[in-house]
Image (cartoon, rainbow, N blue to C red):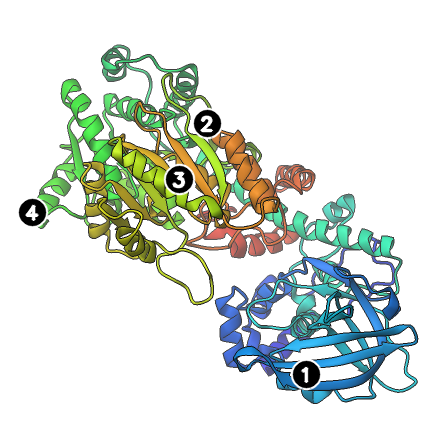
């Protein structure tokens, strides 16, 4: 505790002043960045009122440090400044009331649950206050005759009376004036009360607000009209109830923009530095070799490449001819033809005397790629190999040695490729399939395979592929670091999957449809959000449903079960049986999101579809429609027919294009994980939103470029502090090397 106080004092913490909240003043943080980071990373039990047990509970909900708490922003505000007369109460409205507690009584309802009921009366009438399972501190604080200020949502009560269930309340001293206020409302982590969250946030702001790293160049802050982070957090966490509502809202907008700009500035700076780092790194040049492997392969293809595929190949080949390492992200829907592009790219590397590697997230996917490409490799005289964890020790040793002595030109592998003992001396191209399934550290280890051999310091080209489309707006952001190719058209002959959203009450008919599909010789997927039943969430679970269905509506059918908690070998075994037709209905979780081709599967059913993101659902429906037969995806929705979740799901009924779906998902759910940084480093954006804050993003991008043009090596004193913050937020996750000589 003394340590935290000393740091906050050293940081020059001051009480935020908000007399003129919309005046955009930016005070550079007085403390050094290292001290700021040390203070903000203190555990939450540093704060009064949070003990070790509560701190552990909060950490489990993503609030582990003082910084986490400060960035846990309110999602709305309650304006309690206007006191309503009890007689004006309207069901469904949240209002503030002041009156006298004329009665208070406790009792028990069904199952022994305790209920506390009071009556609040003013000059115009009375209404009931109700607490179910009231905790002791509520009942101990109340007694008849007290003056109360209460706030809550009005609901119908007994008979014609109205009630306020679980109101927030404050006991008023006789003759004392109620203090009007605007209160922030937070997303609650577990059973934590709003009052506790407000108190802890205010305490964290008072003690550590001056440690928030406001180190942007002063001229940038002035030009953009920014508040420093301490002031912005004060406006958001501690709204000034004396201000006019319009002025207060203007202040909140300005504060939030300041926080978003701060995040975007460092993100864009990291992207620019990583791009410069790549352009200064030596790589391999792979020029065109007319009529060699790539030309011969085109003659072997039973079809012509689409215009989109030709365009993407030109982009990749241009990168490969450069003397600097390629870093390109290839985005395309399932079935858009990414594999043939990857293969033709690999052949360009091989015909230039280099080795090419394709890294897949699962053994089944690796086997599928190898089975498809090996016949072509044999006809072209390309030496190919498969390296996976399931190989015997002898086979693995023999394959690893062949790769290490240059006896293999093209390797398909799993995580086994990036384990100790694997050396690829002539690696010229690395291809990562379903790149978001790999952590940053894994992709980095893959790109550095040549450094284990003779050509240390020279980086290979890297092509990242994903069938999970990134929205165009996000792809534009990523272009600051890597090039982005969008494969937006499907090859001719691919049949679109018809999608329909149905309510839970039609579930039985959907299951009958599954039986009918199987009777016609087809296969089906049934996807559930959970592996096993949860005591807290009333959702269907894969294990439970697999048992129930096998005894009821699916009795007599050959069912299989796969989920992420199964051993990988067992999961692969079940998937192989499904692929071979031994299993007719596969009950699964989203572990099948990245799977293999099963041409016989024509029906995908997703239970509790509202629990999934649109992009994830689009990926799931990509598991069907792999053959010639018409395929369907049925999304079962649990909820109202006109709720927001239903409207969100209906996007999939209209949109077959993955990029359109991804844009909608971004609007509904936010950016989520950026650049696959989940396994290492900073967790992306806490405040900024790539759609809503598009203008802020562009402004930050311009300012970043301008600053780097003036101080390209970040040598100034201002840049030194900026660089320290940058290392903390993005240095590890983006693998930034030292950016100054």
Q: Nearer the viewer, mark 3 or mark 2?
A: 3
CA separation in Å, label 3 and label 2: 23 Å
User: Label 1, on which residue?
Assistant: 138
Specify the quadrant that holds the N terminus.
Answer: bottom right
Residue 612 relative to residue 165: left or right: left
Q: Nearer the viewer, residue 67 or 447?
A: 67
Q: Residue at x 69, y 67 (%)?
A: 209
In-image side of 685 versus 484 (left or right):
right
Q: Residues within 10 Å of mark 1 (few under 14, many from 20)?
A: few
Residue where numbered disc 2 is placed: 485
Residue position marked by numbered label 3 in the rendering: 620
**Residue 161 locus on image (x, y percent):** 78, 70
N-terminal-most mark, 2 or 1: 1
State the residue position of label 4. Answer: 394
Do callouts 4 and 1 mark residues in contact (Cβ within 8 Å)?
A: no
Q: Residue 252 lies in what quarter of the image?
A: bottom right
- In the structure shown, which secondary structural element does the residue marked by tag 4 occupy? helix
Q: Cβ–Cβ below 8 Å for labels 1 and 3?
A: no
Mark whose residue sits in front, 4 or 1: 1
Q: Secondary structure at mark 2?
A: strand
Near-viewer residue (358 or 641): 641
Q: Is residue 568 left or right of residue 623?
A: left
Q: Residue furthest left?
A: 394
Quadrant in the picture for residue 300: top left
């Amino acid at each position: 505790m003394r340590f935290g106080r000393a740091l906050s004092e050293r940081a020059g913490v001051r009480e935020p002043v908000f007399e003129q909240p919309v005046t955009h003043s930016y005070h550079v943080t007085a403390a050094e960045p290292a001290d700021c980071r040390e203070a903000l990373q203190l555990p939450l039990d540093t704060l009064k009122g949070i003990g070790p047990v509560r701190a552990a509970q909060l950490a489990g909900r993503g609030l582990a440090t003082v910084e986490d708490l400060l960035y846990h922003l309110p999602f709305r505000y309650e304006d309690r400044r206007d006191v309503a007369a009890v007689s004006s109460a309207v069901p469904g409205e949240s209002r503030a009331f002041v009156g006298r507690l004329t009665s208070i009584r406790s009792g028990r309802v069904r199952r022994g649950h305790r209920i506390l009921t009071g009556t609040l009366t003013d000059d115009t009438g009375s209404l009931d206050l109700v607490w179910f399972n009231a905790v002791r501190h509520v009942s101990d604080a109340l007694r008849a005759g007290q003056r109360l200020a209460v706030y809550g949502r009005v609901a119908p009560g007994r008979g014609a009376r109205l009630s306020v269930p679980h109101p927030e309340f404050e006991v008023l001293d006789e003759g004392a004036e109620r203090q009007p206020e605007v209160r922030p409302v937070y997303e609650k982590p577990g059973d934590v009360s709003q009052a506790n969250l407000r108190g802890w946030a205010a305490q964290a702001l008072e003690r550590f607000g001056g440690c928030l790293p406001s180190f942007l160049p002063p001229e940038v802050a002035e030009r953009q009209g920014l508040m420093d982070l301490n002031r912005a957090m004060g406006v958001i966490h501690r709204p000034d109830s004396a201000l006019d509502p319009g002025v207060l809202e203007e202040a909140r907008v300005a504060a939030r923009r300041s926080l978003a700009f701060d995040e975007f500035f460092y993100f864009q700076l990291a992207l620019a530095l990583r791009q410069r780092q790549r352009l200064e790194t030596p790589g391999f040049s792979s020029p065109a070799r007319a009529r060699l492997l790539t030309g011969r392969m085109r003659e072997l293809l039973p079809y012509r490449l689409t215009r989109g595929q030709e365009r993407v190949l030109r982009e990749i080949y241009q990168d490969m001819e450069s003397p600097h390492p390629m870093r390109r992200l290839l985005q395309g829907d399932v079935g858009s033809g990414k594999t043939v592009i990857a293969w033709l790219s690999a052949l360009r590397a091989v015909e230039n005397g280099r080795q090419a590697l394709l890294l897949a997230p699962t053994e089944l996917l690796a086997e599928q790629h190898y089975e498809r490409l090996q016949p072509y490799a044999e006809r072209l005289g390309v030496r190919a190999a498969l390296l996976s964890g399931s190989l015997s020790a002898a086979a693995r040793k023999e394959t690893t040695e062949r790769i290490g002595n240059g006896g293999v030109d093209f390797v398909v592998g799993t995580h086994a490729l990036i384990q100790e003992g694997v050396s690829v001396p002539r690696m010229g191209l690395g291809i990562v399939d379903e790149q978001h399934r790999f952590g940053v550290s894994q992709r980095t280890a893959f790109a550095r395979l040549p450094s284990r051999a003779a050509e240390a310091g020279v980086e290979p080209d890297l092509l990242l592929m994903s069938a999970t489309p990134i929205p165009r707006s996000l792809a534009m952001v990523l272009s600051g670091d890597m090039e982005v190719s969008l494969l937006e058209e499907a090859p001719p002959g691919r049949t679109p999957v018809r999608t329909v959203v149905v309510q839970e009450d039609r579930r039985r008919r959907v299951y009958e449809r599954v039986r009918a599909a199987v009777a016609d010789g087809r296969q089906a997927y049934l996807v559930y959000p959970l592996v096993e039943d949860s005591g807290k969430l009333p959702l269907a679970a894969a294990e439970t449903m697999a048992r129930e269905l096998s005894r009821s509506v699916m009795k007599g059918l050959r069912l299989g079960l796969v989920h992420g908690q199964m051993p990988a070998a067992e999961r692969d075994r079940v998937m192989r049986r499904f692929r071979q037709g031994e299993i007719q209905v596969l009950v699964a979780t989203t572990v099948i999101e990245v799977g293999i081709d099963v041409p016989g599967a024509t029906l995908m059913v997703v239970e509790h579809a509202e629990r999934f993101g649109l992009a994830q659902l689009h990926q799931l429906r990509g598991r069907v429609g792999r053959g010639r037969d018409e395929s369907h995806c049925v999304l079962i929705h649990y909820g109202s027919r006109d709720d927001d979740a239903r409207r969100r799901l209906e996007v999939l009924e209209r949109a077959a294009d993955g990029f359109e779906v991804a844009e909608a998902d971004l609007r509904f759910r936010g950016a989520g994980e950026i650049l696959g940084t989940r396994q290492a480093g900073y967790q992306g954006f806490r405040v900024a939103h790539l759609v809503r804050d598009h203008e802020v993003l562009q402004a930050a991008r311009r300012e970043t470029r301008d600053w780097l043009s003036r101080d390209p090596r970040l040598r100034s004193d201002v840049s030194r502090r900026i660089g320290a913050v940058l290392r903390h937020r993005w240095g590890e996750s983006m693998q930034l090397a030292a950016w100054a000589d």
